[in-house]
Image: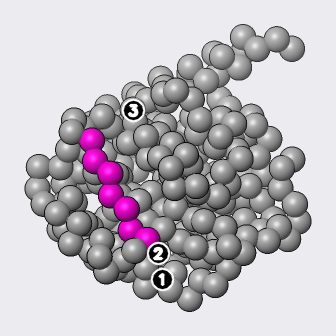
Amino acid sequence: MTYAANKPIASEKVVIIIPTHNEAEVIQTTIQQIFAAVASAEFCEIHVLIFDSASTDKTAPAVRALLEHYPRLHLITEPVKSGLGSAYLQAMNHALHHLGADIIFEFDADLSHQPKYILPMLEQLRSCDCVLGSRYVSGGSIPDNWALQRKLFSILGNYVARTALTYQYKDFTSGFRATRREHLLNILPERFLSNDYAYKIQLLWLLHKNKAKIMEYPIEFIDRDKGNSKLPKNSIMDSLRVVCTLRFHELKRPK
């Protein structure tokens, strides 16, 4: 284990990564709410990194308009949309190697992840390596009005992942996660098995196999108020492919 009980996180740099694609309607509100929610943090230095993937609206200009107001706000862009998993991988490497992040947060641009959870989740990192914002532990929840496809992706995806990989975690498909630097440096691949949402399953599994101490923190996941969902139509099949691939590689490992 690399963690220590009551490990201090004073003066550590936290980078909250937010991938965007056509989020001009919400991104300024998201940034403002995050910085407001962490304004009282005295135990760490919190930055926000926007990774914009070829937005065709005014997402990038909206972020640039806030750069002067928020010195700890950063923006990088890619000219062609490569997918959520690819965006996170690029942004994580930038945060680790160029911004010197000690802790990396994964966070949705649409505020379905609520900023009020950021500081409590960081507090939990005093005694673990990774904190997962979990919808399926006691106290967590998903929206009652979710569409059937969304519920199937989340609930069925988690069931299949837990059955094939490990029952240790309730929420394999959560995209709200805080992870310590040393584990990401050890486990980040050259590319994820999926460039889309299923990267979440692989990343949690890699952390588990690297013996990271992972805790699940209950969150209320809420639906976005503005803009459109970015969930690809093939997400269920993509998640099944990733889970099967991970299980196959596990079976091939020497005993």
Q: Earlier in the sequence, mark 2 or mark 1?
A: 1
Report the magenta stretch's main SS. Answer: strand
* Colouring rule applied to residues: one colour
The kind of residue on which mark 3 rests is Asn
Q: Point out the stretch of residues depicted in magenta.
A: 72-78
Image position, residue 181 (x, y; %): 66, 51
Q: Earlier in the sequence, mark 3 or mark 1?
A: 1
The one nearer the camera, 182 or 128, is: 182
Residue 195 disc label: 3
Q: Does the magenta stretch include residue 91?
A: no
Q: Is mark 1 on a helix, strand or loop?
A: helix
Image position, residue 62 (x, y; %): 19, 67
Is 174 left, or right, of 153 in this rendering?
Answer: right
Q: Are marks 2 and 1 in contact (CB under 8 Å)?
A: yes
Is 159 left, or right, of 77 in this rendering?
Answer: right
Residue 115 disc label: 2
Is 3 left, or right, of 240 in this rendering?
Answer: right
The one nearer the camera, 27 or 197, is: 27
**Residue ID at (86%, 14%):** 255
Q: What element carries label 2?
A: helix
In the depicted structure, whether residue 148 falls above or below residue 33: above
Residue 37 disc label: 1
